[in-house]
Amino acid sequence: MTPREHAGGRPVRFFERAGADARPTLEVLARRLRDGGAEVELLASSEQPDLWLLTARGGPEVAVDAATRTWRFETVAP
């Protein structure tokens, strides 16, 4: 199935950032998303120091800088 065939699923976004400022930057982003109604979770890499991942389910679109990698997915039935 193509992504279009899954239209209507709940949006899930992943924001990845590395470096000394990764955690505080993603924490600010998490607050913005949470204030907009998203369910968020902040994860720290168990293998790479200073590598962080923020997941957001739902919520508003947000702008991020070039140092933050972003992926967009949507939920589908198994």
Image: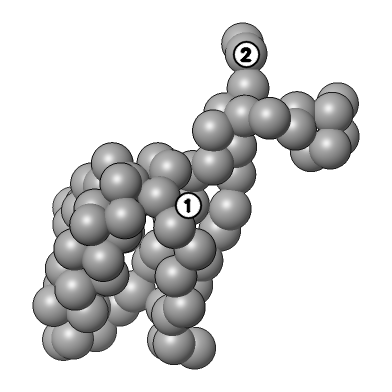
N-terminal label among 1 and 2: 1
52 or 47: nearer the eye? 52
Which residue lies at the image location 32% right of the left edge and 46% below the top edge? 38
How many marks the image carries: the answer is 2
Neighbourhood count class around disc 1 (C-alpha, 10 Å): few under 14, some 14–19, many 20 upward: some
Residue 24's spot in the image, x, y percent? 13, 77
Farthest residue, direction top:
78
Residue on which disc 1 sits? 13
Horizontal arrangement in the rendering, residue 58 relative to residue 38 (left or right) = right
* Quarter in which the N terminus is drawn: top right
At label 2, counting other C-alpha atoms closer than 10 Å, the crowd grade (few under 14, some 14-19, many 20 or more) is few
Quote the CA–CA distance across marks 1 and 2: 17 Å
In which image quadrant can residue 2 be found?
top right
Q: Residue 22's x, y, as percent? A: 22, 78
Residue 77 circle label = 2
Three-letter amino acid code at the position of disc 2: Ala
Residue 54 in sight from this viewpoint? no
* Label 2 residue SS: loop
Front-most of residues 40 and 18? 40
Pick whichever, 26 or 22, lies toward us: 26
Whether residue 35 can be seen here: yes
User: Residue 29: x percent and y percent?
Assistant: 27, 70
Residue depicted at x 43% and y 43%: 58
